[in-house]
Image (spheres, rainbow, N blue to C red):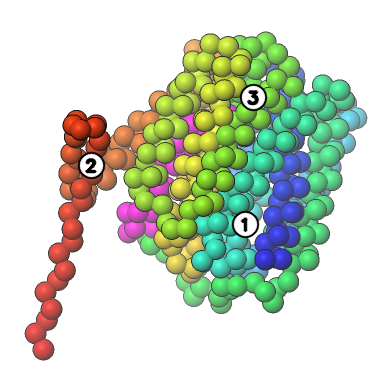
């Protein structure tokens, strides 16, 4: 589909630049703060805090106004902001508080843009192809995550962070051009604005859906405590392995290689993922992140980060698809804003904690604490779901060990007499 191809090309280009920028900004913060994990946590908080305040409003905009125009505006704004930061760095005038302001502003646009972009995918491909499109978008994200940090690490070592930010600014031109080329006549599933686009109405709708609440609550814990890799890997690189920006890029690339695999596997899913798939993948991610935190050396960490990245994307895609394929079109924008609120918005709540713990307990603790939290969240979610649905668990040892989960079959209501 031409429209989706244009969208993907623009996203790939901008994401390459954005991942280069993420690594460059983290490295600038470490340089300006004297390798402070707390400063990294503060920057991460400033970048994601607007999600807590504005994400729900972004969902309201998605259900009410033209998504295509809003996406063009968002990418144009990112171009202007990245250009301003690049000039500041190249001029040698950058200070830590400049980075803080930049992070808040970028995060504000991201908070509004994320639910709009997430719900716009369904207008590009329709409901039938939505699982594949979501997974391909995730593969694009993961592919950029592999190449971007690797390029950025080399460019920072040879040139400077300012050059990397400049390249990112130019990368935002591509999505603007591609979005302008989208053929509106071929967009599908566009409906008139919902009659009731109040945020409260969408929250009540979500609260009454236990299947949606499971995904939201689980990803609040996993995303907030487990997905802090920009902080944890940069600290591991500098404080544990005592290496430079290029090694930080290698660690991030290993994580992203696994993430790409997770996205590609998720793209083959044609139906809504079950709750057991979501919970099981969250538990597996937790175990792998614990192993990443206790890896004895650099190369062992690289190897463990590959399956960790795989499960990171797999669980995120399972949650995303379970929500998008279970919600009606009138509520999709606002419900996806709730997903962004708990998934991305949990980061500013927990990132400073992870940063401080990494300084007090040790750089490795940020990883294994996130892994333990994710594993415990999966166990609690599984226990609550089994209790609510009266699920029977049967453990069989012979002829081979296996666990069976049996849910009661609902009894159909008797037919009314005519």
Residue 251: which disc?
3
Q: Secondary structure at mark 1?
A: helix
Q: Residue at x 62, y 34 (%)?
A: 257
Residue 227 is a magenta residue: yes
Q: Which mark is residue 117?
A: 1
Picture quadrant where residue 380 is located: top left
Mark 2 → mark 3, Cα distance in angstroms: 38 Å
Relative to 345, is 185 on the left or the right? right
Where's residue 361, x and y in %? 49, 12
Per the rendered image, the range of residues in magenta is 206-229
Give the class, few, some or many, for how many residues have Cα within 10 Å of label 1's Cα (few <14, many ≥20).
some
* Residue 401: x %, y % from top left: 24, 31
| Horizontal and vertical percent position of residue 99 | 73, 32
Q: Residue at x 20, y 33 (%)?
A: 399
Tell me the SS state at disc 3.
helix
Marked residue nearer the N-terminal end (2 or 1): 1
Please name the residue shown 56% across and 29% down the image. 306
For residue 279, above or below residue 200: above
Q: Residue furthest front?
A: 399
Residue denoted by label 2: 404
227 to the left or right of 99: left
Residue 248: % across, % down: 68, 22
Indicate which label's residue lies in the foreground, 2 or 1: 2
């Amino acid at each position: 589909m031409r429209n989706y191809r244009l969208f993907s090309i623009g996203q790939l280009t901008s994401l390459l630049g954005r991942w280069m920028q993420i690594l460059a900004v983290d490295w600038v913060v470490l340089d300006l703060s004297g390798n402070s994990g707390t400063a990294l946590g503060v920057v991460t908080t400033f970048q994601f805090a607007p999600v807590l305040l504005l994400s729900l409003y972004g969902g309201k905009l998605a259900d009410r106004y033209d998504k295509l125009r809003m996406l063009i505006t968002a990418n144009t704004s990112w171009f202007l902001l990245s250009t301003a930061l690049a000039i500041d760095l190249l001029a040698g005038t950058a200070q830590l508080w400049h980075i803080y302001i930049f992070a808040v502003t970028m995060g504000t646009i991201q908070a509004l843009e994320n639910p709009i972009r997430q719900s716009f995918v369904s207008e590009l491909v329709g409901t039938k192809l939505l699982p594949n499109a979501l997974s391909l978008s995730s593969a694009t994200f993961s592919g950029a995550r592999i190449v971007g940090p690797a390029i950025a690490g080399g460019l920072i070592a040879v040139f400077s962070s300012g050059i990397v930010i400049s390249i990112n600014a130019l990368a935002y031109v591509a999505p603007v051009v591609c979005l302008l080329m989208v053929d509106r006549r071929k967009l599908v599933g566009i409906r008139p604005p919902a009659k009731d686009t109040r945020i409260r109405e969408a929250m009540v709708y979500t609260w009454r859906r236990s299947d949606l609440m499971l995904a939201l609550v689980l990803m609040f814990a996993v995303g907030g405590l487990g997905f802090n890799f920009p902080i944890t890997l940069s600290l591991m690189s500098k404080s544990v392995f005592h290496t430079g920006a290029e090694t930080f890029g290698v660690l991030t690339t290993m994580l992203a290689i696994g993430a790409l695999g997770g996205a590609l596997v998720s793209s083959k899913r044609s139906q809504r993922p079950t709750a057991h798939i979501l919970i099981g993948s969250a538990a597996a991610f937790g175990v792998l992140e614990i192993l990443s935190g206790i890896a004895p050396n650099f190369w062992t960490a690289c190897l463990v980060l590959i399956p960790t990245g795989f499960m990171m994307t797999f669980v995120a895609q399972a949650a995303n698809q379970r929500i998008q394929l279970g919600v009606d079109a009138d509520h999709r924008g606002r419900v996806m804003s709730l997903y962004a609120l708990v998934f991305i918005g949990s980061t500013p709540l927990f990132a400073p904690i992870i940063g401080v713990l990494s300084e007090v307990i040790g750089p490795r603790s940020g990883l294994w604490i996130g892994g333990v939290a994710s594993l415990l969240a999966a166990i609690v979610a599984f226990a609550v779901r089994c209790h609510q649905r009266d699920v029977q668990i049967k453990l069989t040892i012979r002829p081979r060990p296996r666990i069976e989960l049996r849910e009661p079959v609902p009894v159909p209501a008797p037919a009314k007499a005519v």
